[in-house]
Amino acid sequence: MWWRDRPFELDPSIRRAWLRVEGLSAGYGPIPVLRDVRFEVKPGLTVILGPNGAGKTTLLRALNGLIPRRGLVLLDGEELEEKTHEIVRAGVTLVPEGRQLFPQMTVRENLELGGWLFAKPVRERRIAEVMANFPKLRERSSQLAGTMSGGEQQMVALARAMMGAPRLLMLDEPSLGLAPRMVDELLAMARRIADAGTTVLMVEQNVKKALAVADRGYVLERGALVASGPAKLLARSTVVREAYLGAESADTTTSSNAANDRRGASLRSS
Ligand SMILES: Nc1ncnc2c1ncn2[C@@H]1O[C@H](COP(=O)(O)OP(=O)(O)O)[C@@H](O)[C@H]1O
Ligand SMILES: [Mg+2]
């Protein structure tokens, strides 16, 4: 097992982060990608689904200050800073697509870099705490990150992000390219982090599994949100079943389920 049975511990005095986004637009130079996106990330686990090229990574990059954005981004009612290091200080951390570890550095050194905000004694304490939550990494602390399997590297990336004790953790396709068992472990880890009090916003292509662990979800298509709702209702909604779960998952839905879909999942056309 990758984790202990006890969940991540977070300082109970820390208020659970709540992100509100209104009229968000972002893109690359003259090319617009996101158009007037409005959504909320409440405490818990929120997933963003959508096809390749929809703008999911762009959305996380805009929130993390890696590309310019327009619109309103409020973290607990206060406007989020625009520069990445200020955003990190505000408690928002992104685990980017492809993990981006330092392959020639050890697991421990990668974790130390995740604690750059802290003075050395605090950093040492954080390392001990994170190692306790990722016991497998403690065993591997002197292994070079580049020699680990994809799933192990994703674990290091997650642990490195937790070094900063984020209040809002953003994960960009954490399960990409992993074996099914590792996908389950990674998603279970994201769930535990959310349960322990860190608000999680996760982009995933693994629609069925992501909706099974998430509280809420959004569907992004061509730079606009086209559906949203509680994860259980989204999983049953026509838009998700037809476009993302394929025919084999489109099990017989009763008419009362269909009515629930219409009530619970607000579907907007783009
Ligand atoms: N660095 C970039 N420069 C220009 N266009 C980009 C860049 N990165 C992504 N794009 C474009 O932005 C759109 C959204 O990409 P992305 O956010 O990566 O989608 P997703 O993560 O949903 O697959 C795509 O059309 C993509 O080609
Ligand atoms: Mg992406």
Image (cartoon, helix red, strand yellow):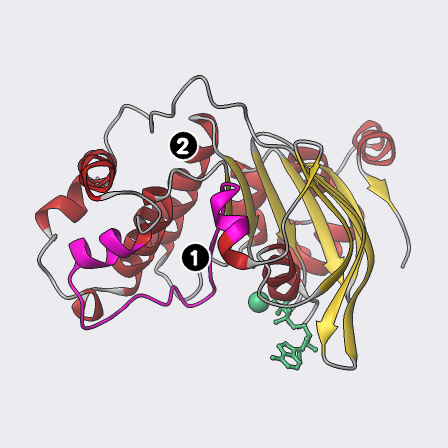
Snapshot quadrant of residue 104? bottom left
Q: Residue at x 38, y 64 (%)?
A: 99
Q: Amino acid at mark 1?
A: Ser
Q: Residue at x 13, y 45 (%)?
A: 138
Q: CA distance from mark 2 to mark 1?
A: 16 Å
Position of residue 6 measured from the top left corner of the image (x, y, whole percent): 28, 23
Position of residue 194 measured from the top left corner of the image (x, y, whole percent): 48, 32
The residue that label 1 is drawn on is 175
Position of residue 269 measured from the top left corner of the image (x, y, whole percent): 91, 55
Image quadrant holding the N terminus, namely top left
Look at the image and give the residue range highlighted in magenta. 86-113
- Looking at the rendered structure, the secondary structure element under dot 1 is loop
Q: Residue at x 87, y 35 (%)?
A: 262
Q: Residue at x 73, y 80 (%)?
A: 29
Q: Amino acid at mark 2?
A: Arg
The numbered dot on residue 192 is 2
Q: Residue furthest right?
A: 269
Q: Residue furthest bottom?
A: 30
Above or below, comparing residue 45 to residue 170 in the picture: above
Position of residue 208 measured from the top left corner of the image (x, y, whole percent): 57, 48
Tell me, yes or no, whether the highlighted magenta stretch contains residue 245: no
Snapshot quadrant of residue 102? bottom left
Residue 176 vs residue 246: left or right?
left
